[in-house]
Amino acid sequence: MLTEDQVSKLFPQFEAPLVEKIAESGALKTFQKDDFLMKTGQHFRNIILIVSGLVKVYREDDQGNEFLMYYLAPGQACSLSMICASRFQASQLMAKAESDVEVLAIPLQKMDEWMTTYKSWYYFVLENYRARFDDLLETIDHVAFRNMDERLVFYLKRYKDKHNTNEVRQSITEIASELNSSREVISRLLKKLSERGLVKMQRDFIEIVDLQKVI
């Protein structure tokens, strides 16, 4: 479990009594890279708060193709777990650890209790809903209104921002799957970006050089 000081540093917006309750109620769980935090069809018994690491949330079709929705970083909550848990619904998305991850699992019954008791928790839940909705709108915007080359650049920029690195350690096949495209198309577009000096194709990763030059 986390101490009150650790909870307070991770969620500075929470008032002291709520911090105490979270420290008392939350169970610290760890996941290794590529572990699943949730799968399609799973029912939630806890609300998930991200303590450390990065979580990828995505949709998967019947053929196993992935469509990236958004990432969850420390200090954020899994809004899907809140919605599904409160309404006793099964998840329609997948969540996988992009790195070693720690989460704080809060018992379901605490959510409604804290919503009416602690104003900071109420606003935290609303802000997480709004932030994930904005993430989804941005993703939908690029899928519906952008060409694949623009979607690829958006993908690379988001990977860089969320992972805090210029090294994209995803295979071309994985990128194509997350963008619902083919390996050949993504390989061709990466080659064009490389020829423009915007990325470098290294042996084990794609190095982002300067995507700000993309218009």
Image (cartoon, rainbow, N blue to C red):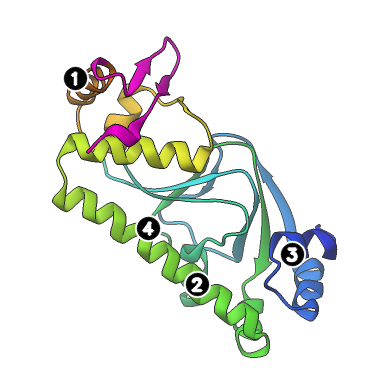
Residue 27 part of the magenta segment:
no
Q: Residue at x 50, y 72 (%)?
A: 127
The picture places residue 90, in percent across and down from the top left corner, at 43, 63
* Residue corresponding to mark 1: 188
Say which amino acid is labelled 4: Asp
Mark with earlier residue (2, 3): 3
Q: Residue at x 77, y 72 (%)?
A: 19
Of the residues tagged 3 and 1, which is closer to the observer? Answer: 1
Report how far apart the C-alphas of labels 3 and 1 lie in the structure. 47 Å
Is 149 drawn above or below residue 1 in the view shown? Answer: above
Residue 89, can we see it?
A: no
Report how far apart the C-alphas of labels 3 and 4 lie in the structure. 27 Å
* Residue corresponding to mark 2: 127
Q: Describe residue 18's horizontal placement relative to residue 99 as left or right.
A: right
Q: Most extreme residue toward the front, as rendered?
A: 213
Is 14 drawn above or below residue 209 in the view shown? Answer: below
* Residue corresponding to mark 3: 26
- Quadrant containing the C terminus is top left
The picture places residue 77, in percent across and down from the top left corner, at 56, 62
* Residue corresponding to mark 4: 135
- Magenta segment range? 195-215
